[in-house]
């Protein structure tokens, strides 16, 4: 788990640079993909190619070997990092090389090839500008695509001035770039071996595809007579023709460029001669064209990942960094916190778990909140939140703690886990039980939980930050309130189940009542049955079996009502999202498909009713009330955020919608002391937007429970759920 002190340090020293650059990349991605008419089709095509390639990987490697050897090169299949390094060392030794120049390669970072060569006395020089900056600074990359993203221009200038003591101090970006180009150019001229990675390798021709922002990869290859390319086995695709969708997507997804500066297709060894920079008189055609090529394909855990149903999708990754750029937590802390030995960002959990092991993944896995912002950003449709959840589940099983305080929550943790997760995760994952007890004993439970000794215990035992207000439980739950009503809708237009999610049933009961009244006012016959919580809470803690148990109980309660002709309406977006997405992995196909097809977020449902003829006259008239609205992360992933604003505007509200994508609360994440500062830092952008001159006097509205909690924490005025704005409140309950 990331230490709060270290997170604060990284936020203070690297956060501004990381945030500015990743948000810039993210904005660029939006603009660039918007210009693609076939964006979703390209993503589907790219995913299909990767699925096929990983499925047929052994045979494709055999085909690739034949192609490379037919071209006069050598393919070496390395079992692990040590095996790969031993082979590379032997190639360099045979060439009797004193210097190796490298273009950017995360795979070479993974195997620590620089250290292996330097131990042999070889001078290894990174020629990518960002990688060279980090080599000079003796630091690790913090981003898959832009390794030095955490360093400002001023910091790089200070580094170069201190390390190289130039005649005139370096200050501007132009001066720094020119200095680096001249310095690296001299080193490339004297190198004997050039090393590259590979974005893709085509099995049919042995072609190496390199997609770069600088020309250093081409220089590395053309200036040396021995080329060593290192790549994970997952980089193999069937054919050159398969490169098209990836070339279209990789730059747009990573840096927001329609196409990166250099797309190089190398089919080595090539017959073009090695450039001799020292001889400017000999014609190029007369220079030595004898080249040596070695492709080192690296397993290092990948074949085991291929056989792992939950980690296999990691191998579809094309290393574009879209998951990092789109992640609000990464934007605050960067890859030195949100990353492992080599890889960073959302997809890093899968890579580090598969390549390094669960211990490494455990160091940063909790920084993924499952908000799902990365899902739509990924150009090959990897379900990154699910990979993070599964790895968290596996980490839990090996990290149960010493059990000293288990007795304090034993009655609150009736989970289905075969092994006990850490205590804090057990509590948050079983919050349904705590909520039931809290409501049953309210208001005493609320008073007791907020006393000094209780808050101290919550911090010490469960890691709950005392700066956060705790949920206030209602004595009468929504289910109980509804059961005591005597109201029916005559000749209803629709019949629906209002799903009593955990918070709506026990904490935010008023929004549940408002939802019932709004639906009834629009001619919907509503029932509010008893049902289990959705499983979102245990899922967020990596408690997959407990989440599956919840999902099965929810299906038992709701599917028969759907089959009887009722729709399912959900107030909390994260619960609606779990019905739509995660239940596919937790339920059998029929139950999942039924729930996914017939469940709706509440304002999505209201929008549908109004679009199909229901009158808004029975709802509250906004009369021009000025509203500042923030939608929920998972609501955006599902493409549902627009319905709320449309309904509010149709009912007469003046709506300004936030373009901030994440409030930073993310359920239990924002309550935990280790992550409180990160959570608030993410939320500050939203708070700033809602205290700007045009929004400072607007009614604050948000769709998600976490969003409402965060806004109440950060703002001086209260927030409310949009369905409460529409509540007609025109009849007694």
Image (spheres, rainbow, N blue to C red):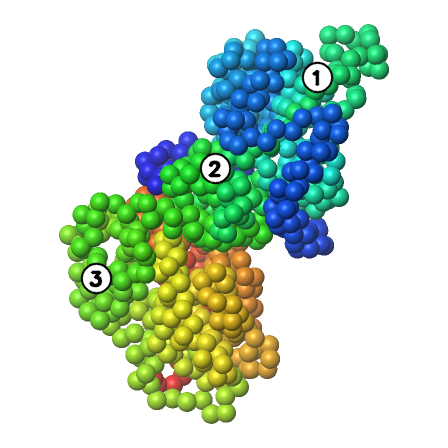
| Whether residue 380 can be seen here | yes
Instruction: Name the N-terminal-most of marks 3 and 1.
Output: 1
Task: Give the residue at the far left of this rendering.
Answer: 453
Dot 2 alpha-carbon crowd within 10 angstroms: few under 14, some 14 to 19, many 20 or more? many
Per the image, label 1 sits on a secondary structure element best described as loop
Residue at 40% x, 34% y is 10
- Left or right of 159, for residue 548: left
User: What is the number of callouts on the image?
Assistant: 3
Instruction: Name the N-terminal-most of marks 3 and 2.
Output: 2
Dot 1 alpha-carbon crowd within 10 angstroms: few under 14, some 14 to 19, many 20 or more? many
Contact flag, marks 2 and 1 (Cβ < 8 Å) = no
Instruction: In the rendered view, tell whether residue 557 sits above or below residue 701.
Output: below
Return the residue at label 2. Answer: 355
Assign the N terminus to one quadrant of the image.
top left
Contact flag, marks 3 and 1 (Cβ < 8 Å) = no
Return the residue at label 3. Answer: 411
- Left or right of 140, for residue 62: right
Asked which quadrant contains residue 250, the reply is top right
Asked which quadrant contains residue 320, the reply is top right
Instruction: In the rendered view, tell whether residue 67 sits above or below residue 706.
Output: above
Image spot of residue 485 (x, y percent): 33, 85
Q: Marks 2 and 1, how far apart in space?
A: 32 Å
């Amino acid at each position: 788990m990331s230490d709060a002190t270290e997170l604060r340090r990284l936020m203070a020293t690297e956060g501004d640079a990381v945030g500015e650059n990743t948000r810039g990349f993210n904005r660029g991605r939006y603009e660039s993909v918007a210009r693609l008419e076939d964006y979703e089709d390209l993503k589907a095509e790219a995913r299909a190619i990767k699925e096929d390639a990983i499925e047929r990987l052994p045979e494709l490697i055999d085909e690739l070997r034949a192609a490379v050897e037919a071209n006069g090169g050598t393919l070496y299949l390395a079992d692990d990092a040590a095996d790969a390094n031993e082979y590379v060392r032997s190639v360099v030794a045979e060439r009797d090389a004193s210097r190796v120049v490298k273009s950017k390669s995360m795979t070479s970072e993974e195997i620590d090839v620089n250290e292996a060569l330097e131990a042999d006395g070889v001078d290894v020089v990174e020629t990518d500008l960002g990688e060279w900056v980090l080599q000079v600074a003796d630091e690790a990359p913090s981003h898959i695509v832009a390794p030095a993203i955490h360093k400002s221009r001023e910091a790089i200038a200070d580094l170069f001035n201190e390390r190289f003591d130039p005649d005139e101090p370096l200050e501007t970006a132009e001066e720094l770039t020119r200095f680096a180009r001249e310095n690296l150019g001299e080193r490339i001229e004297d190198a004997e071996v050039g090393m590259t990675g590979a974005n893709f390798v085509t099995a049919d021709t042995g072609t190496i595809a390199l997609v770069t922002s600088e020309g250093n990869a081409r220089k590395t290859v053309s200036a040396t007579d021995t080329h060593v390319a290192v790549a994970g086995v997952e980089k193999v695709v069937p054919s050159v023709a398969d490169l098209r969708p990836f070339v279209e997507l990789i730059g747009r997804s990573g840096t927001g460029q329609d196409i990166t500066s250099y797309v190089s297709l190398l089919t080595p060894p090539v017959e073009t001669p090695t450039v001799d920079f020292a001889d400017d008189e000999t014609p190029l055609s007369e220079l030595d064209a004898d080249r040596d090529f070695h492709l080192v394909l690296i397993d290092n855990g990948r074949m085991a990942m291929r056989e792992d149903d939950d980690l296999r999708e990691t191998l579809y990754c094309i290393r574009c960094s879209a998951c990092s750029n789109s992640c609000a937590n990464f934007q605050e802390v960067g890859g030195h916190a949100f990353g492992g030995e080599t890889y960073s960002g959302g997809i890093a959990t899968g890579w580090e778990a598969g390549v390094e092991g669960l211990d490494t993944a455990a160091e940063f896995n909790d920084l993924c909140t499952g908000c799902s912002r990365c899902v739509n950003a990924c150009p090959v449709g990897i379900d990154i939140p699910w990979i993070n959840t599964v790895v968290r589940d596996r980490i839990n099983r090996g990290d149960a703690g010493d059990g000293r305080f288990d007795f304090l929550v034993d009655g609150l943790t009736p989970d289905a886990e075969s092994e006990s997760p850490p205590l804090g995760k057990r509590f948050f994952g079983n919050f349904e039980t705590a909520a039931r007890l809290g409501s049953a004993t309210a208001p005493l439970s609320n008073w007791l939980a907020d006393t000094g000794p209780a808050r101290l215990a919550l911090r010490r035992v469960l890691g709950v930050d005392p700066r956060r207000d705790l949920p206030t439980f209602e004595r009468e739950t929504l289910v109980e309130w509804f059961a005591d009503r005597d109201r029916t809708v005559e000749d209803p237009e629709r019949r629906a189940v209002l799903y009593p999610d955990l918070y709506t049933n026990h904490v935010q009961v008023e929004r549940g009542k408002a939802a019932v009244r709004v639906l009834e006012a629009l001619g919907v016959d509503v029932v509010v049955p008893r049902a289990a919580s959705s499983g979102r809470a245990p899922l967020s803690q990596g408690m997959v079996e407990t989440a599956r148990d919840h999902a099965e109980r929810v299906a038992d309660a709701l599917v028969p009502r759907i089959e009887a002709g009722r729709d399912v309406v959900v107030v909390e977006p994260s619960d609606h999202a779990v019905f739509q997405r995660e239940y596919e992995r937790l339920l059998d196909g029929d139950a999942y498909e039924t729930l996914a097809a017939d469940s709706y977020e509440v304002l999505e449902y209201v929008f549908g009713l109004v679009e199909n003829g229901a009158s808004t006259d029975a709802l509250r008239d906004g009369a021009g009330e000025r509203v500042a609205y923030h939608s929920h992360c998972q609501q955006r992933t599902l493409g549902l955020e627009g319905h709320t604003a449309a309904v509010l505007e149709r009912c007469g509200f003046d709506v300004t919608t936030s373009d901030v994508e994440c409030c930073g609360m993310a359920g239990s994440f924002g309550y935990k002391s280790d992550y409180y500062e990160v959570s608030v830092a993410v939320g500050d952008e939203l708070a700033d937007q809602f205290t700007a001159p045009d929004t400072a006097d607007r009614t604050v509205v948000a769709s998600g429970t976490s969003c409402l909690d965060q806004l109440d924490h950060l703002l001086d005025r209260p927030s409310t759920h949009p369905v409460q704005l529409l509540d007609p409140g025109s009849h007694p309950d």
